Image (cartoon, helix red, strand yellow):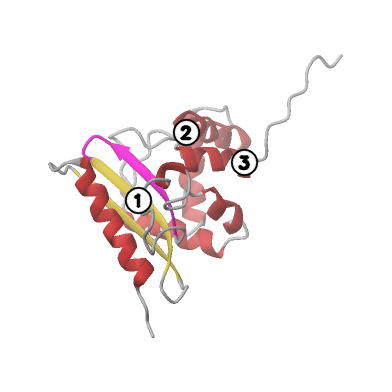
Amino acid sequence: DLLFTNYSPPLREIIKVVNKQSQNFYAEQILKTIGLEAGHFGTTENGIEEELDIFKDMGINTDGMSIVDGSGLSRLNFVTPRNFNSLLNFMFKSKYFVPFYNSLPIAGVDGTLGTRLKNTKAEGKIRAKTGYLTAVRSLCGYAYTGDNEPVSFTIIANNFNVPVKLAENLQDLVCLRLSNFRRK
């Protein structure tokens, strides 16, 4: 006899929590689920193996890439800005773009970017995932230019010895530049 049934929220809702709030525990569980769904045990190792295969299928060069967790909190993770931008460009063309895009924090509005770029031209025009470790700040996502043209960007600052706020301010200045950029 059936004892219990539990239905998960849709993945698009789970991803929204992961990306907007930077919920690392959820990210770790998604990685294990990827391994499980591929027909293996739901382990980090199996998830990473499958994830690297998925990246290769997307056309992302995984040479030199090292992934050891699902949250990105390990200092043993090595991913280049080009890797991130390749993923962003793939997603932009994907049928999953809208739920992915909607999962990203919005500058000056919500999530981990809710207090950044408020009352600037970039407010609402930048959607990006933040990354935080000691002496590491990253920001990857999409900007809408002054011509309302979407562009992907990746900014990673490693091993800096200035106040964190300065690293974030530099990222914000790049986002302001992108949101003000015009081709015409």
Q: Secondary structure at mark 3?
A: helix
C-alpha distance separating marks 3 and 2: 12 Å
The residue located at (58%, 31%) in the rendering is 40
On residue 23, the disc is 2
Q: Which residue position is annotated with label 1? A: 139
Report the number of discs. 3
Q: Toward the viewer: 70 or 57?
A: 70
Q: Is residue 92 magenta?
A: no
Q: Nearer the viewer, residue 70 or 183?
A: 183
Vertical side of 108 occupied by 19: above or below = above
| Quadrant of the image occupied by residue 35 | top right
- Identify the residue at horizontal 58%, vertical 61% (top origin): 94
Q: Specify start and end residues of the magenta stretch as a single range.
A: 126-135
- Location of the N terminus (image quadrant): top right
Q: Residue furthest bottom?
A: 184
Give the answer, above or below, for where 65 lies relative to 147: above
Residue count near mark 2 (Cα–Cα under 10 Å), binned few <14, some 14–19, many ≥20: some
Which residue is pictured at 25% across the width and 52% down the height? 169
> What crowding class fits label 3: few (fewer than 14 Cα within 10 Å), some (14-19), or many (20 or more)?
some
The residue that disc 3 covers is 13
- Please tell me which residue lies in front, 110 or 88: 110
In the orientation shown, which residue stands out farthest toward the left? 161
Instruction: Considering the whole magenta stretch, tell me its main secondary structure.
Output: strand
Is residue 75 rendered to the left or right of residue 97? Answer: left
Q: Amino acid at mark 1?
A: Leu
Question: Which of the numbered marks, if any, corresponds to residue 28?
Answer: none
Question: Based on the displayed image, in which of its 4 quarters is residue 85 positioned?
Answer: bottom left
Measure the C-alpha gap from mark 1 to mark 3. Answer: 21 Å
Could you tell which of marks 1 and 3 lies nearer the N-terminus? 3
Secondary structure state at the residue bearing disc 2: loop
How far apart in space, not on screen, are marks 1 and 2 (Cα)?
Answer: 16 Å
| Amino acid under disc 2 | Gln
